[in-house]
Image: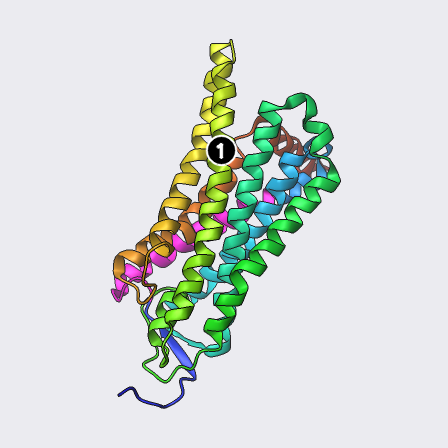
Amino acid sequence: MKNQTTVVEFIILGLSNNHHGNIILSVVLLDVFLLTVTGNLIIVTLHLVDHRLQTPMYFFLRNFAVLEICFTCVITPRFLYSLLTERKSISLPGCFLQLLLVFFLGASMFCHGAVMSFDRYMAICHPLRYGTIMNGRVCFQLVLSCWVMSFLIMVPPTFMVVLLPFCGPNVINHFYCDTAVLLQLSCVDTGHLEVMIFFSATVILLGTLTVTIVSYSCIISTIMRIPSTTGRKKAFSTCSAHLLVVVILYSSSTFRYLRPGQRGVQDFDKVVSFLYCVVAPLFNPYIYALRNEQMKEALKDACGRVSKCLRFS
């Protein structure tokens, strides 16, 4: 029989119980957090101030950067706080808010990634019609559809997890509030919710992955027809970097959420979650944007203007 005392807070164990290991992890995590936020803030700022970046590709990159900043700020600061203070408790409202935001923002990131893949497909495979099709209104509608679709698919089943009764124990074997652990801790049968969450994750992950694979397959097919060897190498270099992020993000997320029986978390699951919650957001701004020549030029010019202002101030 489970203790029927109502839970008022959860205890988040984190990745490790080793004190010295947690100190090292906190330093690494702080560096990764600052690099991730800084890289994405640079993308947002450059897009707003540089007229050369007022194109659909950079519009989508800016929105993706804003998403990554929000997603990272939902998970990493709370994780850092628990590592530095060794206070592992989190209130029920705090845990439930983190849960809702993680799944909503995470789903939005996958949808935005698929839209970015489609945008690259249009630009490379249909360059003559690209400007006409991907106009400002269409770009806005695509971004809005990402937010709306993510909300409609992921928030309802996640909100149902929030409404579950929790009677104890209250220990979360993870570094953030995740559905798999909360389903295990609930004192009622959660079989129907497991099916709903599995179905929602399948729609988001496999749906966006299909769009991404089809888009990049067409892009690679078009690249193969480029007569210049140098042009092919440059295009393949860009695509391979993008596909590396796609592989890391989708392989870890698919392993974590597209498995039958979403109850409980093993230590390896926490490592997999760390990949798509912390590692992938670090790589995305540098691979998707800051390696781009136009973005480099815009950054160089912005640094030059700032330097000139500082000299005359």
**Badge 1 amino acid:** Val
Q: Is residue 275 left or right of residue 266?
A: right
Q: Which span of residues is magenta-colored?
A: 14-43
Q: Nearer the viewer, residue 274 or 226?
A: 226
Q: Quadrant of residue 119?
A: top right
Q: Picture coordinates of residue 58 (x, y %)? A: 63, 37
**Residue 100 against residue 200 in the figure, above or below:** below
Q: Picture coordinates of residue 85 (x, y %)? A: 39, 71
Q: Is residue 229 left or right of residue 115?
A: left
Q: Picture coordinates of residue 174 (x, y %)? A: 34, 65
Question: Does residue 28 belong to the magenta stretch?
Answer: yes
Q: Residues within 10 Å of mark 1 (few under 14, many from 20)?
A: few
Residue name at image x 52 percent, y 60 percent: 154
Question: Does residue 195 belong to the magenta stretch?
Answer: no
Q: Picture coordinates of residue 285 (x, y %)? A: 52, 41
Residue name at image x 64 percent, y 32 percent: 298
**Residue 73 against residue 283 in the figure, above or below:** below
Q: Nearer the viewer, residue 291 or 307?
A: 291
**Mark 1: which secondary structure?**
helix
